[in-house]
Image (spheres, grey):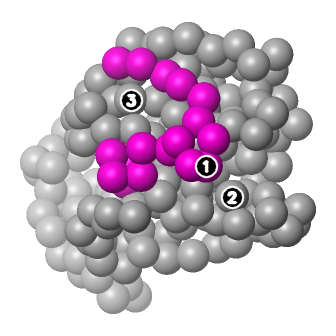
Amino acid sequence: MKFCSECGGSIELRIPKGDDRDRYICDDCDHIHYINPRVIVGCLPVYEDKVLLCKRAIEPRYGFWTLPAGFMENGETTEEGAARETWEEARARVSNMHLYRVFDVPYISQVYMFYRCALDEGLFGVGPESLETALYTEQDVPWEEIAFPVVRETLKAYFDDRRRDNYPVVVDAIRYRKPPQKN
């Protein structure tokens, strides 16, 4: 950041009075520009005994499988954002949405929120950010090709919870980058 979005003045990185960390502060109007974590919202769409996954057509992790998810937009709720991302990536409509997993990922300044939901009528397609989409049973999930640790953790938890028929909301943290795991 080089210029203030409020007045166009130059900014510098310093600790504001009463704060404990560096912030971008305008030299002219003293506006403090906070940079906060980004929120990623997504769905775990379920149809019968299968979950819907998308093969990524974008970086990072091009060609790897993920749940439909993406950055939350201004002016929408987390639930609306998760449903929008599912439409954009998988051309799927979802309903009966329940918050299921929240992950804090401080090493990349992100927060993930996944909703467990129904895949309406089992219909889906391929959006512009996906190479393909497919429904998978637990045994057919391409575990070695899952894009992100939060997706792997969410899928594993879902299949365990389904066996117990109990779907608690869990908040967890992934504090460091884990290398891809093989099952």
Task: Residue 160: name its quadrant.
Answer: bottom right
Task: Say if mark 2 contacts mark 1, CB within 8 Å.
Answer: yes
Q: Is residue 41 above or below residue 156?
A: above
Q: Which residue is mark 1?
A: 138
Task: Say if mark 3 contacts mark 2, CB within 8 Å.
Answer: no
Compared across the picture, whether 170 is left or right of 165 comes to left
Q: Amino acid at mark 3?
A: Lys
Q: Secondary structure at mark 3?
A: strand
Asked whether residue 29 appears in the rendered view, the answer is yes
Percent across and percent down for residue 2 are: 10, 48
Q: Nearer the viewer, residue 162 or 58?
A: 162
Q: Nearer the viewer, residue 87 or 79?
A: 87
Q: How many marks?
A: 3
Percent across and percent down for residue 124 are: 63, 15
Taking the spot 56% from the left edge, 11% from the top edge, the residue there is: 125
Q: Secondary structure at mark 2?
A: helix
User: What is the crowding at mark 1: few (fewer than 14 residues within 10 Å), some, or many (at least 20)?
Assistant: some
Q: Quadrant of the C terminus?
A: bottom left
On whether residue 157 falls in the magenta region, the answer is no
Q: Which mark is residue 33?
A: none
* Range of magenta residues: 131-148
Task: Say if mark 1 contacts mark 3, CB within 8 Å.
Answer: no
Percent across and percent down for residue 14 are: 18, 75
Q: Which mark is residue 55?
A: 3
Instruction: Quote the CA–CA distance across marks 2 and 1.
Output: 7 Å
Task: Residue 177: name its quadrant.
Answer: bottom left
Q: Which residue is mark 2?
A: 159
Q: Nearer the viewer, residue 63 or 176?
A: 63
On whether residue 134 falls in the magenta region, the answer is yes
User: What is the crowding at mark 2: few (fewer than 14 residues within 10 Å), some, or many (at least 20)?
Assistant: some
Q: Is residue 1 above or below residue 121?
A: below
Mark 3 vs mark 2, foreground winner is 2
